[in-house]
Image (spheres, grey):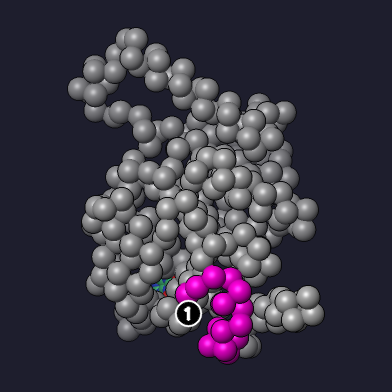
Amino acid sequence: MNVSHLSLAFGGLKALSDVTFSVAPGAITAVIGPNGAGKTSLFNCISGFYKPSEGKIEFGGEDITRLHPPARAKMGLARTFQNIALFRGMTVLDNIKLGRHAHMQTNVFDALWYFGRARREELELRSELERRVLDFLEMEYIRDHPVASLSYGLRKRVELARALAMQPRVLMLDEPVAGMNREETEDMARFILDAKEEWGVTILMVEHDMGLVMDISDHVVVLNFGQVIAAGKPAEIQNNPDVITAYLGSGDVGELSRRIACEKAA
Ligand SMILES: Nc1ncnc2c1ncn2[C@@H]1O[C@H](COP(=O)(O)OP(=O)(O)OP(=O)(O)O)[C@@H](O)[C@H]1O
């Protein structure tokens, strides 16, 4: 995926200015930056919820800048949300099944085309995939539990499962470990890495947890005031003076300096 010269304004406020970066296939790319830097705005432009005023987003060689979110999802762009967006009264499995709708045919001709054996085979394949996702995320034992009865960490995992069940080419994770305790964070880190390594999914994530970002990312893009101020490997980013300056005064600087101190001590 290539994002080029993307700009977005809310009235007089420039949320994004000339943002350019690439997401390498098969890698984990993280977008970081202090509060209000433009990370969520960037995610919303990429998934199609916001229309950028300038710039281009290419996905799999196609220009998707003007496509609606469902069309992008159909092309293999899946996302999770910062605040959990699940149907709380429904079971884990039913929530995961909702991911399939991105691939299901909706018009009459498509429905007729799929009628009968082909349709049944597709449904069987989907069930098999949902079973594999449940197994992969170690959630088989809660498949029939209502989402409302689950812990916060498990609910975040259901969101990941639903996105994976869309068989995405690129999975966008919006703050996947926000609000999680250490153990839940470690579990999620392992699942994200495995999604990349075992399922071959390309990952683009926004995350405040600097420890997670530095541990699992292949490439980090740093935003500040809507502009890219640095991009590179985690080790390069955490020693970049512009990044450290951008984080001064933000709540995340503590974690960043702790990481730098640990690297120096090692
Ligand atoms: N819908 C909106 N209307 C007006 N201004 C907005 C809107 N969404 C975001 N902004 C502004 O755009 C800027 C970038 O916000 P954004 O939410 O993208 O940053 P962020 O990096 O995701 O922040 P955080 O880490 O706090 O989630 C901020 O100044 C914010 O106030």
Tally of numbered discs: 1
Quarter of the picture holding the C terminus: bottom right
Which residue: 56% across, 84% down? Answer: 240
The main secondary structure of the magenta stretch is: helix
Q: Is residue 184 magenta?
A: no
Q: Quadrant of residue 143?
A: top right
Q: Can residue 230 be seen here?
A: yes
Residue at the disc numbered 1: 230
Residue 52 in the image: state x and y as whole percent. 29, 68
The residue under the point 47% across, 79% down is 230
SS of the residue at dot 1? strand
Q: Is residue 123 above or below residue 201?
A: above
- Of all residues, the one furthest to the front in this rendering is 266
Image quadrant occupied by the N terminus: bottom left
Residue at image position (34%, 10%) is 117
Depth check: 104 or 56 in front? 56
Q: Position of residue 67 (x, y in %)?
A: 26, 52
Question: Residue 22, image x and y in percent?
Answer: 38, 64
Report the span colored magenta. 231-247
- Res 64 visible: no
Q: Is mark 1 within 8 Å of ligand 1?
A: no
For residue 250, above or below residue 194: below
Horizontal side, residue 99 vs residue 261: left or right: left
